[in-house]
Amino acid sequence: MTVLLDPTSEHSPTSRERLARPPSLSGLTVGLLDISKPRGDVFLDRLHERLAERGVTVKRYMKPTVAKPAPVPLRQQIVGEVDVVIEGLAD
Amino acid sequence: MPDDLAPASADVPGDGLIVVVKRDCPTCELTVPVLAELRRLGQVTVYTQDDPAFPEGLDAVDDTALDVSHRLGIEIVPTLIRRQGGVDVGRTYGWDRAEWERISGFQGIGADLPAFRPGCGAKNLEPGIHEALKVRFNETGLSSRLVSLGSGEDEFEAMFERGWSDGLPMVPPTQERVLRMLSGTARDPAEVLGLAPPDLIPLTIEKVAINAVMAGCKPEYLPVVIAAMEAVLDPDFAMHGVLATTMFVSPVVIVNGPIRRQIGMNWRGNALGQGNRANATIGRAVQLIIRNVGGGRPQEVDRATLGNPGKYTYCFAEDEEDSSWLPLSVERGVAPGKSAVTVFAGFGLQGVVDQKSRTAESLARSMAESIKAIHNVKLVPAADAILVVCPEHHRTFKAAGWSRQRLLEELTQLCKVPGEKLVPGYLGIAEGCAPGDRDKVFDKIRPGGLLIVRAGGGAGMFSGIIGGWSAGGASIPVTKEVGN
């Protein structure tokens, strides 16, 4: 019988519960995170307008580069300042 | 646990003399009369490693399974051991009359023999056998999960089915092969090199070795694979981004220093092509590690639109044999004479064909114009890049007295592009810089983003450009020294 050594991480990802969606954005602060992809700002600017029209408080954030994860201080700042965050993930 | 992995038992006399021999050893043959003398004089047990009938007439114990030899840690035959109360109290190797007299307690044995003859290597330490014994005695020291294949299961198909392959067949990573691979490094199999993206899994030397086996590496390549992984996992290289981007890139591994020759790498003809085991398998091991340990697979976290053929393997050595240019590693701060790897996030090869330039100035202009085409002639600053200078092109720079640094500076100047050639609509192309940037001058290559290396066969005025990523220096080349 052939016995092989497992080349993988032998790691099974744990699934995490999603946070409950807020019933409404009323009274909440929404963060818009620009991941520094070209023209992402065009999309986020429009979202900003639409949210502002509905009286929602909006804060804007930006990752220094699309290529790396957001720095920890930025993530902590976002967590401390907003209730909901909207982030684009692709082109 | 399967039967063939059950711990082997080997009963060894707790008291008296033991001699371990094999027929395939002239020194063992030489000592046969001494063994007969010892047998007449007292209690001696002879174990034979290769031929149960050897030595004749001495009731030798068959140790062709080598269990006793392994338990006793025999390294040389013949070995004479005195045991007392279950432990060794004296041991000697080869034939050394004085030592044999001291340990056996009998003077004048082997009087007709020369005073000294060195022994031979023990069979239990032969490559392949030693690893199998460690497996049989559960002494591998490895911690990875054992995957037992079904008796009717084809081991090559099994690896494909488990998702371990890059699409090509692989060498099955048995415990014996992985132990042999680990003999290529002095490092602890449990040592962690860093977190392998995208799953951020601690990457151990053991997992590197398993994937190196599958890639087809020899043990002596392992230090290069380890150094390449240390470079790839450096935060400056940003492997997560290199993997996840829709761009074409993947790690290109360039090897410098004496290890290139020691492991038989190719920097000559077809250096970036197929046909050299070290080049091919080192690059492949890097890819398999990201796939299997990091969990980075195409159409999952690897979002490449097209990818490139180098994502199977992309590794070559630099031509250092002409000393007119310093090796890349030395230019990047590694001490001369040391081996090192440099990793670069690159994609496929774009040729620079110039068979007519006979001056450094003309040739540099040729190369600069080709570099300007990376990604798109209308895009700046477009990309990092590697310029691979072939010997016939290098000859022109050498004759002109241009160092690598001089060429770099000239190319940097020649790769400046005026905004008027980049504005949207120029050449009928919408891509380009901002409309208001017409009067600016742009660098095509990010400062520090151009590597120049030498490789290739002696004939052909064909250099190459390996384009890189665009994300503003998000992944920068990393150089690491090769350890042991």
Image (cartoon, helix red, strand yellow):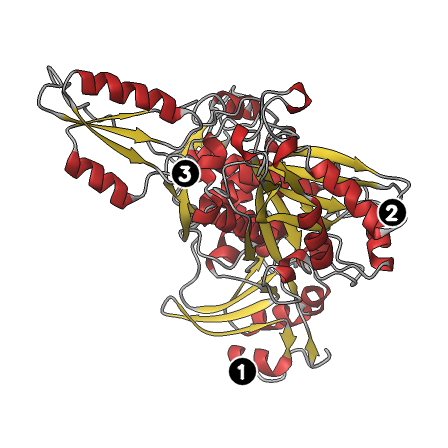
Q: Residues within 10 Å of mark 1 (few under 14, many from 20)?
A: few
Label 1: which secondary element: helix
Residue sitting farthest toward the left: A27
Please name the amino acid that badge 3 sits on.
Thr
Q: Which residue is mark 2?
A: B458
- Sequence-wise, the earlier of marks 1 and 2 is 1
Q: What's the residue type where badge 1 is placed?
A: Arg
Per the image, the residue denoted by label 1 is B102
Q: Position of residue B97 (x, y in %)?
A: 63, 80
| Quarter of the rendering containing residue B428 | top right
| Place of residue B14 in the rendered image (x, y in percent of width and height, measured from the top left) | 40, 64
Q: CA distance from mark 1 to mark 2?
A: 64 Å
For mark 2, give the secondary structure. Answer: loop
Callouts 2 and 3 close, C-beta under 8 Å: no
Q: Chain of mark 1?
A: B
Q: Chain of mark 3?
A: A
Q: Which residue is mark 3?
A: A65
Nearer to the camera, B29 or B254: B254
Whether residue B314 appears in this view of the structure is: no
